[in-house]
Image (tube, helix red, strand yellow):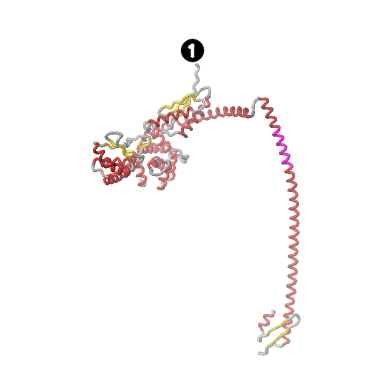
Amino acid sequence: MSLLSILKSKSAPTRLFTTKSTVATVTKPTTPGPDLAQIQSTAREIILEAKDEAIRIKDQAVRDARERLSEIEAQAKSLTQKQQELTRQDELLNRARIGLDEEDKKVEKLKGDLLGKQEELVKKLEKIASLTTDEAREILLTEIRKKSTAQIAKAIKEAEEKAKTESDELAREILVDAMRAGATDYVAEFTVSTVAIPDEETKGRIIGKEGRNIRVFEKVSGVDISMDETPGEIRLSSFNSVRREIARVALTRLIKDGRIQPARIEEYLEHARLDVERIMFQEGERLCHAVGVYNLPREIIAMLGKFKFRSSYGQNMIAHTLEETQIGIRLAQEVKANVDTVRLGCLLHDIGKVVDDIEGSHVELGVNFLKKFNLPIAVVDCVEQHHEDKEFTSQESVLVYIADAISGARPGARHENVEDYIKRLNRLEEIANSHEGVAESFAIQAGRELRVVVTPEKVADDQLPILASTIKDEIQNSLTYPGTVKVTVVRETRAIEVAK
């Protein structure tokens, strides 16, 4: 029974004062309570219980302290053992390090001895063979190069023969059928930016007082006007073919009206611009429907309509696109490719050529323009890869590339400036003549084939495929040309005797 419970059970308040050996009790005699002997007895019991509890707590604390001391001693012993083990391992590592250092010294010594012996052997070999090290190396490399050349040439020849045997007939049938499908009645339209004038009076009205009319016309239309080159006509020049067509239409109507003044010039140019834009949209829509494409965004259709006033090497872009798309569709049907992807890829492959006011190649401009309309990624890839600017990622991309090459390279499809044509032919021959062993070269078939004649004493038979491949790569990397260029290397040996 605790002291607190005893005190709470008393009816009269009682305060106890305890010391180590005595208990003093003060009782306020307000109400009757237990007698003094009972209280003293209870107090003694409490004191004895407290002493017992104190002894018990002290004994427990001593036991806990001894257990903790034992644990600490065990940990200290373990740490001492680990420290001794680490010291032993450190000594072993030091011995191993010393041993490795000694081995390194031995290796360095052996290496020096070997280098010295190698130099002695090289000198002896050079003395015996009467050749320096560089000369011997060059002879060895030459022999290896000869053997490799023969092996490479043989592999190339075998691959070419196998491919020709297996694919020529099938490819010929597919391409002929595709080109027949691409044949179109569309007549290529070449826009000649000239306007006929009936008399000198009309020319004077076009020029205006102090050149006012012609200055306004050039400023608003964005084209240059030339009147002195050919009598009876006016020439309009501008890199933008659409602007040039707008100017031609407006100037034709102004001459017919006869009232030529700045305000009317601006009015006629605006009307001509709207009319040309309407014509272009109709042409773009007609082109899409001709190849079976519907529901394209209006911006794309309007951009395709600009092909009417754009040509490449003299080949009208609408004619080229229509022809290429029909060829690509037939090729896709033959090889079981995705026809719709090839159809759109062929239709849109050159759209970058009519994207104005932005710098960049037509491939880059076309890809950036088409990405605005969330077209299928496969179609955009066809446009991006149709000139092999990037590696082909699908069969459809390859078919678009082939169809474009067929349409652009067929005879009569394109023409170019005579001066540029002559320069290209001369450049083809220069590339061939720059190689060792080439006696002479000839660019024939309008630059579509290059015949290279080599000196038999300088170029062996097995080197011909490698020379042809090297010339082909240089032409691809340094020249721009329509279609393809076939490189033929000829080696001929003759023996001539005259009987008398």
Residue 497 in picture, x, y percent from top left:
50, 14
Q: Using the rendered image of the protein, determine whether residue 106 is visible from the camera's viewpoint.
A: yes
Residue sitting at x 73%, y 40%: 105
Residue 290 in picture, x, y percent from top left:
34, 40
| Front residue of this view, candidates 396 and 375 | 375
Placement of 77 over or under 231, stated as above or below: below
Q: Tell me if 45 is positioned left or right of 167 in this view.
A: right
The kind of residue on which mark 1 rests is Val
Residue sitting at x 36%, y 31%: 412
| Front residue of this view, candidates 313 and 399 | 313
Residue sitting at x 76%, y 59%: 77
Q: Is residue 283 magenta?
A: no
Q: Which residue in the protein does label 1 denote?
A: 498
**Quadrant of image for the N terminus:** bottom right
Q: Main secondary structure of the magenta part?
A: helix
Residue 125 in picture, x, y percent from top left:
67, 27
Residue 228 in picture, x, y percent from top left:
30, 35
Q: How many marks?
A: 1
Residue sitting at x 66%, y 27%: 126
Magenta span:
102-116
- Could you say which quadrant of the image residue 285 lies in? top left
- Could you say which quadrant of the image residue 225 lies in? top left
Q: Using the rendered image of the protein, determine whether residue 339 is visible from the camera's viewpoint.
A: no
Q: Is residue 105 magenta?
A: yes
Look at the numbered disc 1 and give the secondary structure of its residue: loop
Q: Tell me if mark 1 has few (under 14), some (14-19) or many (20+) residues whose alpha carbon lies within 10 angstroms of its own.
A: few
Placement of 113 over or under 440, stated as above or below: below
